[in-house]
Amino acid sequence: MKRKKKGISGVLCVQHEEDVFCEYTKRYLGVILRVPFVVEYDLIYFIAEVYGFQDRSCFSKFLEMLDKSPDIMFYEELEKNKHSGTVLIGKKSYGVLKALYKTKSVLRGSFIIKGGVEYFPVIVFGNPKKLEEKVREYVSRRAIAYFKVNMDINIEKLSAAAPIISKLREELTHSEIRVLLAAYELGYFRWPRIHSSEDVAKYLGISKSTFLEHLRKGEEKIIRLLHDLLKT
């Protein structure tokens, strides 16, 4: 058997307009839906685990939304306790799983839905932008899709392991941190680049020139601190 080239691990982030789960998690920002098992890609069957609601009415509202949504074929409440619940659901697919299949990408674990966005942990064996394009091609409703690399890395985790990061947090502005993290997550620093400066700027909702300015200032501060550290 031939060895397959190493894939790129990351998270495919998809925001569907009018999707019942995206709409629910936008309305209840503290709630997370976890989907550990999926079958097929046209009609999907899965168990949704609902976490984080502050009172039982949130779960009741979730069931009401399932009742009203034309995309839900059936559901069955399996379990409910104080802050979580489990529901078996049959739902029409919007094409994300088909896009994964067509691009030979692999879903590598449970996906979650939070704050109106679906997060799919995936391994991509080609250009991640092709996966984004296929998502937009196959979904029946307008959707925004972005692939992010190594999304679990953040400033807080790094600061515990490297004292220099504490200094960086003092030096970098909020805008510079936001731009640097987005550029990293979207593969701007990889070669070949996954997303261009225009892509990252659009994702952040800022102009290309603003993105490049914050990026340049942030990079300069990081290199200056590293320069001082390496010369000592």
Image: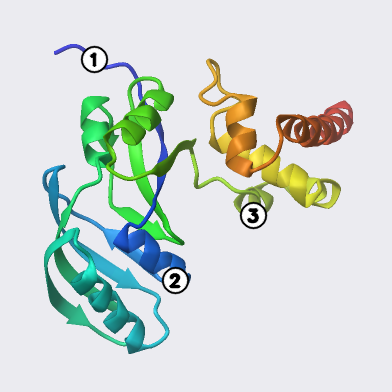
Separation (CA) of disc 1 from disc 3 = 37 Å
Q: What residue type is labelled 2?
A: Arg
Secondary structure at numbered mark 3: helix
SS class, disc 2: helix
Could you tell me which residue is drawn at 81 percent across and 29 percent down? 223
Residue 183 in view, yes or no: no
The amino acid on which the numbered mark 1 sits, given as a three-letter code, is: Arg
Q: Residue at point 60% right, 34% down?
A: 200
Vertical placement of residue 33 versus 169, above or below: below
Residue depicted at x 64% and y 54% = 156
Circle on res. 27:
2
Q: Which residue bears the numbered disc 1?
A: 3
Q: Mark 3 points at which residue?
A: 156
User: Considering only order in the chain, which callout, 3 or 1, is on the residue closer to the N terminus?
Assistant: 1
Left-right relation of 99 to 127:
left
Can the viewer see residue 221 in this picture?
A: yes
Most extreme residue toward the top, as rendered? 2
